[in-house]
Image (cartoon, rainbow, N blue to C red):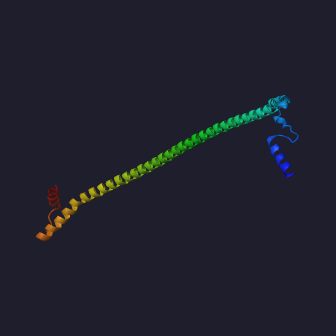
């Protein structure tokens, strides 16, 4: 029996059945029916693919393409809005900087004008006090100088009296001599 099984395995491997026939796909008498079923199967498969599967896949691809295009358009719109917002922000920032610079310049000018005004007022007060002081000094100097002649005449008269002894010279003569000496 082991001998028969060994032959059976060998014959089965080659495609020959025990009864002496060949494996049906390799049997040349069944080729026309196999080709007919191949053509029918291929035709049905082709028809199913072209009418059902491929349109669905095409629809899915079209939907995907449309969704991608929509997403790209949305991204482009959002990028444009972002760019506009950034431009708006930058222009507002530039305007704020310009306004701040203007305000600082105005404040600086105002403080400078106030300082200049206060300095001018202080200079004016100092000039008035200086003029007043000069007038006072001139008045005191003139008054002192007017008395210098009298004081010099009196002092000279007393000195002459002390030097000569006894009698004082006439005031008119002493005043005349002092005036001559002062000039």
How many numbered markers are drawn? 0
Quarter-of-image position of residue 15: top right
Q: State left or right for residue 41 relative to residue 161.
A: right
| Image location of residue 30, percent across then percent down | 85, 31
Q: Is residue 84 above or below residue 166?
A: above
- The one nearer the camera, 52 or 27, is 27
Q: State left or right for residue 156 relative to residue 52.
A: left
Identify the residue shown where x is 16% and y is 65%. 157
Q: Is residue 161 above or below residue 106?
A: below
- The one nearer the camera, 73 or 66, is 66
Q: State left or right for residue 102 relative to residue 138.
A: right
Asked if residue 151 shows in the view, the reply is yes
- The one nearer the camera, 64 or 56, is 56
| Image location of residue 73, percent across then percent down | 68, 35
- The one nearer the camera, 172 or 104, is 104
Q: Is residue 8 above or below residue 66?
A: below
Identify the residue shown where x is 14% and y is 56%. 180
Quarter-of-image position of residue 67: top right
Identify the residue shown where x is 34% and y is 56%. 133
| Image location of residue 163, percent across then percent down | 12, 70
| Image location of residue 69, percent across then percent down | 70, 34
Question: Looking at this rendering, what residue extends furthest in the left direction?
Answer: 164
Asked if residue 37 shows in the view, the reply is no
């Amino acid at each position: 029996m082991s001998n028969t099984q060994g032959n059976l395995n060998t014959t089965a491997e080659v495609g020959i059945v025990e009864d002496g026939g060949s494996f049906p796909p390799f049997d040349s008498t069944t080729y026309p029916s196999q080709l007919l079923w191949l053509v029918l199967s291929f035709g049905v498969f082709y028809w199913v693919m072209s009418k059902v599967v491929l349109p669905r896949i095409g629809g899915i691809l079209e939907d995907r393409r449309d969704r991608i295009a929509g997403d790209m358009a949305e991204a482009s719109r959002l990028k444009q809005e972002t760019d506009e917002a950034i431009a708006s922000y930058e222009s507002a920032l530039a305007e704020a900087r310009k306004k701040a610079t203007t305000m600082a310049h105005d404040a600086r000018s105002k403080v400078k004008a106030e300082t200049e005004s206060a300095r001018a007022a202080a200079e004016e007060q100092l000039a008035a006090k200086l003029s007043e002081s000069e007038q006072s000094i001139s008045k005191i100097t003139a008054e002192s100088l007017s008395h210098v002649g009298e004081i010099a005449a009196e002092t000279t008269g007393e000195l002459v009296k002390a030097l000569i002894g006894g009698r004082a010279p006439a005031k008119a003569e002493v005043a005349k001599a002092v005036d001559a000496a002062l000039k």
